[in-house]
Image (tube, rainbow, N blue to C red):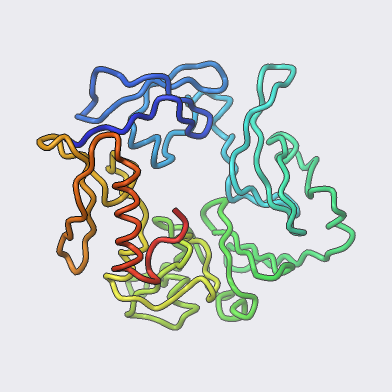
Amino acid sequence: MGKVRNLVGKRFGQLVVLEECKERQNKKVMWLCQCDCGNKKIVSGNNLKSGTTTTCGGYRHRADNLTGVRFGHLVVIGQGEPVKSGKGTTGTSVCLCDCGNTVIIRNGSLKNGLTKSCGCGCEENRARILNKSNGNIYDLSGEYGLGKASNADIWFKFDLDDYDKIKDYSWSLSHRYIVCHQWKVKGCIYLHKFVMNEKDSMVDHINGDSLDCRKSNLRKATSQQNSMNRGEPINNTSGVCGVSWKKDKQRWKAYITLNRKQIHLGYFKEDEFELAVKARKEAELKYFGEFARQNE
């Protein structure tokens, strides 16, 4: 088993890691965390790093994560820090307004419809165009189109000039991608491939966001090139793809895989983790070029 990266003191959503648990569950490293509401919860490191668990799971948190949901002219782009209220604490959300401003709004104000913009006057200055079609809702009022998945409170991006092309299909969220299921032909259409007119070739999301299907964020790629732009695997314990702890050598190992062959980048002492990461990133630029992951 590789060396476990210390998560003590780190925040994941509304959980702050207090200490590593001595006992393992199904060979997984477990961490004792404290939620912002005061409750404590034991969570696996994988669930913390992948974003699967971000609260203690108490009733007050179940609907707190509104990421991707639109309220009026506001789209939630992340969770904010909880704030004090008369009953203890209440959740907040980081929202992007149609005018471009970013604001932090209490979740209750969003859900109750009390706040629909950053206060810039979007309601008076912009005519929001909403179109319902095949279970989807489309917003065509901005520089690019927004579509709401038919099966989830998730919004995806597309170019306005693709609206006529996609409007007659029912788009839903499936395994992080926007797809249209075609039961008659026993398959599905991927939106990012559809707008690029690619049926068989791979299409890569340049910024790593699978919900951003604007053509400026898409490029044709081979399977190898597409894999170069993938994020950190869920089972990664170091926190960085291509860096692992070698117990037998008591060293960090940096490596990169190209054409199914692993290229060794070097061993690094326990306190040289950042050097191992640097070696990996430099190798990505050297071997992956334009397909090196950009948002990490």
Residue 125 vs residue 161: left or right? right
Vertical relation: 267 (above or below) 8: below
In terms of depth relative to the viewer, which is nearer, 33 or 89? 33
Left or right of residue 186, residue 176 in this image: right
Left or right of residue 283, residue 121 in this image: right
In the rendered view of the protein, which quadrant contains the N terminus? top left
* Residue shown at 84% from the left, 48% from the top: 119
Name the residue nearer the viewer: 71 or 223.
223
Image vertical order of residue 128 relative to residue 13, above or below: below
Q: Is residue 160 left or right of residue 267?
A: right
Q: Residue 63's x, y, as percent? A: 57, 35
**Residue that appears at 40% across and 25% down:** 8
Q: Quadrant of residue 137?
A: bottom right
Q: Position of residue 296 (x, y in %)?
A: 44, 53
Residue at 65% from the left image edge and 65% from the top image edge: 138
Residue 111 position by quadrant: top right
- Residue 233 against residue 51 in the figure, above or below: below
Q: Residue at x 35, y 56 (%)?
A: 281
Pick the residue in front: 130 or 228: 228
Tell me where residue 15 appears, x and y as whole percent. 49, 27
